[in-house]
Amino acid sequence: MRISPLFAILALVACNEYDINGNQPKPDAPVDTGDDTPVVVGPQPDIQVDPPSLDFGSRPKNCPSDPEVLTISNVGTEPLDISSMELVGAGSSNFDVFGIARDLDPGESYEVDVTFIPTAWTEFNVALRFTSNDPDEGELDVGLKGVGAEDARYEERWTQNEPSSVDVLWIIDNSGSMSDEVDALAANMPTFLNNFMRLGMDWQMAVVTTDMEDPTDSGRFQGIGVISPSTTADPVAAFTTASAVGAGGSADEKAKDAAYAAMTAPLVTSANAGLVRAGGTFAMIVISDEPDSSSMSTSSFVRWLDLYKGDPDLTSFSAMAGSDVPAGLPFGGGDPYFDETTLTGGFYSRLADMNFNEVLTYLSFTAAGMHTRWTLHYEPSNVAQIDVSVGGVDQPYSATNGFTYDPHTNSVVFHGDAIPEPSEAVVISYPYNTGC
């Protein structure tokens, strides 16, 4: 078929008109994506609120919370006009906002404070609504949550430490009453070392006695000296030999004096050289059934140990001790070792309990700078309402594979499989009595 010249000219004109003046979107116009949400291209304001929600937890009735801060920002490329900022939802009167709506240039931000004051024993969920010229978030709601409770609820979060290397000094009582305990220690030592192996620890150990009268003791390393998996063919056998200190030592036990002598000149630069390395943690563990009679005071010893590596978090002093403490006394009562372990972040256990397997598990984690217990900020008002999660998994109240609460130290104690692994997140929440 032939096309007339006139038709061809009209077709060319129509094509040119479409290319020049067709229905192309303008740079700032919304693009139809096929749903109800317009997508805006080109320069625009963009509101951002951080954090996107606030949870005030539980507060006593009529008791205001501490202020929580919201940061409002314009992360766009055009001025942001915030026309209003208002609380919406039932129960809004239980929240107060300190600040006003304001306009923001690109990259500019400001802060407002929000508080929660419950007027009833119930849960409140409202929103703080920002109305602005943001093209796709003209109304942005920030969730606000709080609970009015008879007691406040407190939440503590922490992350288990990631161990690297650890050097351990054992101070073992070699007086006449310790033969059974020394045998039990040697029999259960694989538990301690197996935890180190499982955690991939780079470790070293040495043993001294509490005898500061015999010149062959007096802070000198026993057995082959420094024991490590890289230099010792059979570390368990080497420790068993070193810890077999007998029961003929002085009855005047001086654990702190022995530890100090072992780790200071002249011994630390001669016979005892090589135990403590530049990196990692340094742990001291004493095993004794009698009170310490060292010339060194608790405060002097703790100060010396805290400064030994320049960071108190890298050193600890633990004890299995106090078997002669009357059962009626508080946990650790009458035993100075209890104060020294508490002040240095160590672990304390009554030697009379003789549960070496479990205690050595705790000691291995503590020596590595990890937590097996967590001291709470407040005292729980209801132990049955303590909630604990490890690695996002809720833990049962159990002394086998879970957690228990120790009222003597106001701490949550982890047991068995519930002991947090390196880098695991731990969350503990509990009710506590408080006033406004």
Image: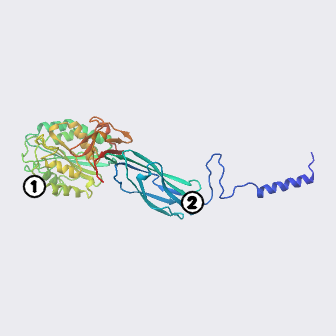
**Which color scheme does this rendered protein use?**
rainbow
Q: Is residue 324 left or right of residue 392?
A: left
The percent position of residue 20, horizontal first and vertical second, equals: 77, 58
Residue 201: in sight, yes or no? no
The percent position of residue 252, horizontal first and vertical second, equals: 7, 48
Residue in front for this viewpoint, 50 or 143: 143
The percent position of residue 312, horizontal first and vertical second, equals: 25, 55
Q: Amino acid at mark 1?
A: Ser
How many residues crowd mark 2 within 10 Å: few (<14), some (14–19), many (20+)?
A: many
- In the picture, the quarter occupied by the C terminus is bottom left
Element class at badge 1: loop
Residue drawn 91% across the image and 49% down it: 3
Residue in front for this viewpoint, 314 or 6: 6
Q: Is residue 100 left or right of residue 370?
A: right
Cα gap from disc 1 to disc 2, whole angstroms: 71 Å
Mark drawn on residue 64: none
Residue in front for this viewpoint, 370 or 433: 433
Element class at badge 2: loop
Res. 270 image quadrant = bottom left
Chain-order first, disc 1 or disc 2: 2
* Image marks 1 and 2: residues in contact by CB distance under 8 Å: no
- Please say if 319 is above or below 48: above
Q: Which residue is mark 1?
A: 295
Q: Amino acid at mark 2?
A: Pro
The percent position of residue 108, horizontal first and vertical second, equals: 50, 64
Q: Which residue is mark 2?
A: 45
Residue 214: in sight, yes or no? yes
**Marker count (numbered):** 2
- Please say if 298 is above or below 79: above
- In the picture, the quarter occupied by the N terminus is top right
